[in-house]
Image (spheres, rainbow, N blue to C red):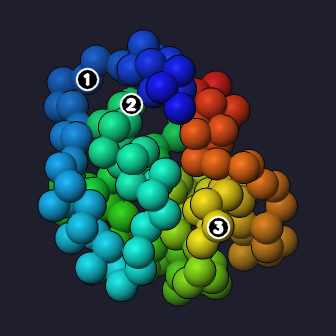
């Protein structure tokens, strides 16, 4: 995990208005808003790297409710188009969503084809998908 965090931090792009890193209260507020407990690795992901900007993907965030990547808004939309409530979206991409399952794995889901790929953990997904996007 730490090697992925370090790699993401190294790849972070400086921008005029950087993202804020959430605190634990931000994560709890997001959980309460979506009425779903977040998988522990996903919580750690949000607390350590959700302020990183790299590659072409924009994972969900929880620090700024007005952001287009704010988890409650992304989740509401993903669930409204068919993503299972047992999966929490971590990133919208190409008409589908990468989502964390209740077991902690990550799947890529689209409305047309359902789940099409899977990664063991959010950290494996971050290394193999987000970091190289």
Rendered image: mark on residue 103: 3
Rendering quarter of residue 94: bottom right
User: Callout 2: few (<14), some (14-19), or many (20+) C-alpha neighbours within 10 Å?
Assistant: many
Rendering quarter of residue 13: top left
Tag 1–tag 2 contact (CB < 8 Å): yes
Q: Nearer the viewer, mark 1 or mark 2?
A: 2
Task: Give the distance between the C-alpha atoms of the residues marked 3 and 2, in whole angstroms.
Answer: 27 Å
Dot 3 or dot 1, earlier in sequence: 1
Residue drawn at x 36%, y 64% is: 71
User: Callout 1: few (<14), some (14-19), or many (20+) C-alpha neighbours within 10 Å?
Assistant: few
Q: Residue 15 at x, y = what percent? A: 25, 23
Q: Residue furthest top?
A: 10
Tag 3–tag 2 contact (CB < 8 Å): no
Rendered image: mark on residue 53: 2
User: In the image shown, does 113 or 40 lie closer to the viewer?
Assistant: 40
Q: Is residue 133 left or right of residue 41?
A: right
Give SS at disc 1: loop
Give SS at disc 3: loop
Rendering quarter of residue 99: bottom right
Task: Give the distance between the C-alpha atoms of the residues marked 3 and 1, in whole angstroms.
Answer: 35 Å
Task: Give the distance between the C-alpha atoms of the residues marked 1 and 2, in whole angstroms.
Answer: 8 Å
Give SS at disc 2: loop
Q: Residue 29 at x, y = what percent? A: 21, 70
Image quadrant in which the C terminus is located: top right
Q: Residue 112 at x, y = what percent? A: 80, 74
Rendered image: mark on residue 85: none
Residue drawn at x 33%, y 52% is: 61
């Amino acid at each position: 995990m730490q090697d992925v965090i370090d790699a993401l931090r190294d790849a972070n792009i400086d921008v005029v208005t950087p993202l804020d890193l959430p605190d634990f209260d931000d994560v709890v507020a997001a959980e309460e808003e979506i009425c779903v407990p977040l998988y522990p690795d996903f919580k750690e992901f949000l607390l350590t790297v959700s302020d990183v900007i790299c590659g072409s993907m924009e994972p969900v965030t929880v620090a700024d409710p007005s952001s287009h990547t704010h988890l409650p808004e992304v989740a509401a939309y993903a669930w409204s188009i068919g993503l299972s409530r047992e999966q929490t979206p971590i990133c919208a991409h190409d008409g589908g969503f990468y989502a964390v399952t209740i077991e902690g794995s990550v799947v890529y889901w689209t409305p047309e084809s359902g789940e099409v790929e899977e990664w063991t953990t959010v950290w494996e997904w971050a290394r193999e998908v987000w970091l190289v996007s």
